[in-house]
Image (spheres, rainbow, N blue to C red):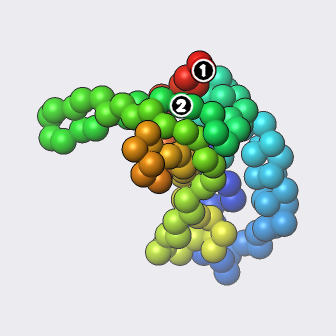
Amino acid sequence: MRQSLTPFVPSSGQRPVDLAGARRAAEERAAHELPSATWAVPPPLTALLKGLKPGQRITITQTVRVGQKSWPAVVTGTFRALNYLVTGLATDRVPDDDIVVIALHFTKDNGELSSITMDEKTKVELVSP
């Protein structure tokens, strides 16, 4: 699992936390990688995702798993945007220590606007024109 974007603090009363320093460190890491709280994004995928431009055709493959069965779900569409879904935790941690997942937004061939959150098994490929 990846390191958190901010330091873990068991109780905010026990130790001061440099939130500005943690934010700066997170911004420096984000310049070279895609931050994700749940998995380390491989450099080739990071380069592909950061290089995508709206309007480019992509194919996305995710593995769907229900019980013991799993199968690939493949969709082709037009890239719209890449951003993050930030979820909060209901635990005694640093308030800025959110779970961050990568969200990929695209338009399916039938015109439907769609989005996925990426995990370590998600594959994204650029479709050549």
Left/right of residue 25 with respect to residue 104 in the rendered view = right
Q: Nearer the viewer, mark 2 or mark 1?
A: 1
Left/right of residue 52 with respect to residue 101 in the rendered view = right
Total labels: the figure holds 2
Q: For the point 58% across and 41% down, which residue is it? A: 79
Say which label, 2 or 1, has the lower sequence index: 2
Query: Residue 129: which disc?
Result: 1
According to the picture, the residue beneath numbered tag 2 turns out to be 58
Using a 10 Å C-alpha cutoff, classify the residue at mark 2 as few (fewer than 14 neighbours), some (14 to 19) or many (20 or more): many
Looking at the rendered structure, the secondary structure element under dot 1 is: loop
Three-letter amino acid code at the position of disc 2: Ile
Query: Residue 83: which disc?
Result: none
Q: Quadrant of the C terminus?
A: top right
Q: For the point 67% across and 54% down, which residue is it? A: 5
Task: Identify the residue at the far left of this view.
Answer: 68
Three-letter amino acid code at the position of disc 1: Pro
Residue 46 visible to the viewer: no
Percent of width and height locating residue 116: 45, 48
Tell me if residue 128 comes above or below residue 13 in the rendering. above
Q: For the point 67% across and 42% down, which residue is it? A: 54
Left/right of residue 117 with respect to residue 13 in the rendered view = left
Percent of width and height locating residue 100: 57, 56
Q: For the point 55% across and 59% down, which residue is it? A: 85
Residue 118 visible to the viewer: yes
Question: Which of the two residues, 104 or 106, is positioned nearer the viewer here?
Answer: 106
